[in-house]
Image (cartoon, rainbow, N blue to C red):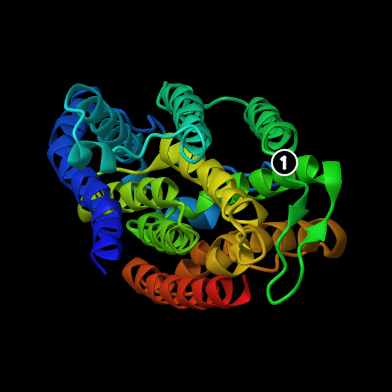
Amino acid sequence: MFADLSDIVRVLVPAFTAFVIGMALTPVVTHYLYTHKAWKKAPGKLSLDGTPALEFNQLHYSHEVSAPRMGGIVIWASVLITIVGAALVARFIPDAAALKFDFLSRSQTWIPLATLIVGAVVGFIDDLYAIRPSGEGLRLSYRLLIVILLSSFIGMWFFTKLEVTAIGIPFGMPLEIGWLIVPLFVLVSLALYASGVIDGIDGLSGGVFGSIFASYSIIAFAQNQLDLAAFSAAIVGAILAFLWFNIPPARFYMSDTGTMALTLTIATIAFMTDDLGGGVGIAVLPIIGALLVATVASNIAQVISKKYFGRKLLRIAPLHHHLEAIGWPGYKVVMRYWVLSVVFAFVGVIIALAGA
């Protein structure tokens, strides 16, 4: 009983620490962002087919040029400070208590941490380009190439170094797919990166991402991957700190430096909680991340409908902006997405724990 309690504390302390650091860091970050006017200099965005998104621009015209981007710095910086700080404390105060809170490990957290950092850096560069007078970020082709290269490298690491060749099937035996684990990881990473556009309404992305990482923290904990559980919990704590200031009216947007870091990290954690951890982390990802799936699916459906049927399926894609366009206030969309994200997360965790 005591060991179980200590393990729980070991996971919760990083979450609390990241939350406190995020709360302390946010005023500094926002001061800098507002001082340097880190927002788009011209309002408006393009639709998926390259034409002006007129209805979206009407809904979000003023906020785009008054709320800074790069709020995701709060999330990844809080996690980085937490995990590095715990490792340094354990190094210089090498007693049992300090070592138990050190969750930086080669076997569980090096890969997701590297993914978080690379995604954050690439997203940060994109945001820097986006706040220029021209308002253009990195080309989509460049960003997709980076996602493909990064995910290919990590997929190969899973295949060659960790010898992951199967995916877990709920209530069944693992499915052996061999080297196909690599392209599967690439496809999952691309799909999750595409879902980053859920960062479109104040408070929306924070609530959804928080539920997803909390789910995988529970799953990793159940698999006794305590370092991975602590890492995921630290991300939850950092997201909650971000969300504290992102509730309408938002102080800043998460933007690419946050969404790219988080979506790519979700892919890594899902694979680490799959056959590698004796679980079904990949199979439950579409359930736990159902709202991310809906976001990507609505974009795809919109493009297909316009290209092959000559009309829009939704007034604005993705789905959450369509709901705004038909009259739902932004806060109502956000709150209902939060409710649904908790429901899907609960269902996904139950299946993961029962079906492993």
The answer to which image quadrant residue 243 occupies is: bottom left
Q: Compare residues 225 and 40 and report the one nearer the observer.
A: 225
Asked if residue 230 is positioned above or below residue 258 in the image, the reply reads below
Residue 299 visible, this angle: yes
Tell me where residue 152 appears, x and y as whole percent: 72, 32
Determine whether, in the image, residue 136 is placed left or right of residue 80: right
In percent of width and height, residue 244 lies at 21, 54
Occupied quadrant, residue 162: top right
Neighbor class of circle 1 (other Cα within 10 Å; few <14, some 14-19, many 20+) is many
Residue 53 in sight from this viewpoint: no
Q: Secondary structure at mark 1?
A: helix
Tell me if 214 is positioned left or right of 88 in this view.
right
Tell which of 164 and 122 is nearer to you: 164
How far from the left and from the top, in percent, is residue 141?
69, 29
- Camera-side residue: 205 or 328? 205
Residue drawn 24% across the image and 57% down it: 6
Task: For the C terminus, give its image quadrant.
Answer: bottom right
Q: Residue at x 47, y 44 (%)?
A: 262
How many numbered badges does the structure rendering display?
Answer: 1
> Residue at label 1?
186
Question: From the viewer's perspective, is 154 left or right of 307?
Answer: left
Residue 12 location (% of width, % of height):
25, 55
Q: Quadrant of the N terminus?
A: bottom left
Q: Amino acid at mark 1?
A: Val
Residue sitting at 73 percent across and 40 percent down? 163
Which is nearer the eye, 356 or 147?
A: 356
Left or right placement of residue 37 versus residue 210 in this view: left
**In this view, 123 is above or below 186:** above
